[in-house]
Image: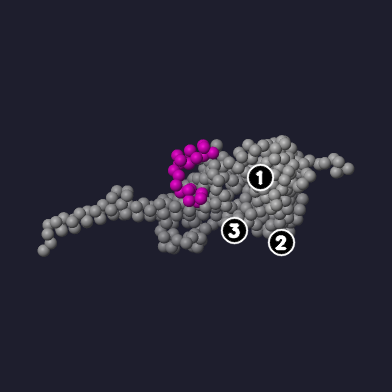
Amino acid sequence: MESPLTYLLYFLLIITGLIVVFYPNGGIYWRLKNSFKNDSKTLIEDILKKLYHAEDGGNSLSTNDIISSTNIRPKIIIEIIAQMKANELINFNNGNIKLTENGMDYALKIIRVHRLWEKYLSEKTGFDKKDWHDIAEKMEHKLDSQQTKELANDLGNPRFDPHGDPIPTEFGEIESIQGEPLPVFKEGTIGRIVHIEDEPDIIYKQILAEDLHIGSHVHIVENNEKRIVFHSEGEEYILAPIVANNITILQLLKEEISEENTFRLSNLKENEQAKIIGISNECRGEIRRRLLDLGFVLNTKIELDLISPMNNPRSYLVRDTAIAIRNEQAKYILIEKIKNDANSN
């Protein structure tokens, strides 16, 4: 026969177990419940984004399309879609899913947070641009409307994210992207890059590897089914049409063309002189401030001073001061080469 003390210990163990499991907010039961709730919210928001992007591109998605685009069990997707229908976020039309007005408003709020986060990451942090999208994908589910408003105010209520995508306003208003995909234009066209699509990831990373930036001018010199060749900031680029299709340019009028003699400082050769005409819009945050502090400012004359054995870094003469920077930074400094009259005669 068990002693009263043993029964008391059993009782205390049971009570302790119940507290661990059911303690309000912190217990295992509530944590699991909140986790499921958060996962459900995240999945709903991800599906809303998929539907928005499909409709924005003139396409439609079915339940099977959404199931095949995720790694989530079909049963869970079907339950979530049923929940979205019950909450009047979506409707069905001939087997396809369509956003309701409420669903569209919700989708634009998520997209707004995502693009604001990308802007924040590009302006305020040192994260590499290839990581912005993935970080924003996680953070877009965490901010409420007040926090989103504060983030937008802190950034100066920007109209576009770092890729050139318009950022929806607090009231769901969104600007259209001007321009056309690069392959649309004929040889001889000069335009400005206004948008770089960041999906699919494999194509976006290839564009990043080419060091192409929003705001750069491009001059198309060859355009056919196999390749597109263009010049930008003193560099020649050769892209497959499927890659170039993710780059949107706005054709420039003759009076708008002012960068035919624009190069990157990293292209400056020995015995050449140049003047600085600006710093690329792609250069942001601490790096931009450092370059300006070092004296790389508008209309400053500059020439190559010394080259390291590996050609990186290189030293430049700026206002009688030798300043060494790496080529990865020099590419952000835009220059106009000064013709040497003595050599040109």
Taking the spot 48% from the left edge, 41% from the top edge, the residue there is 148
Residue where numbered disc 1 is placed: 325
Picture quadrant where residue 323 is located: top right
Residue 90 highlighted magenta (yes or no): no
Residue 279: percent from the left, percent from the top?
66, 41
Residue where numbered disc 2 is placed: 226
Q: Earlier in the sequence, mark 1 or mark 3?
A: 3
Alpha carbon separation for disc pair 2 and 3: 19 Å
Taking the spot 28% from the left edge, 53% from the top edge, the residue there is 20
Q: Nearer the viewer, residue 255 or 324?
A: 324
Picture quadrant where residue 239 is located: bottom right
Determine the secondary structure under disc 1.
strand
Determine the secondary structure under disc 3.
helix
| Segment colored magenta | 135-155
Q: Is residue 143 left or right of residue 216?
A: left
Residue where numbered disc 3 is placed: 202
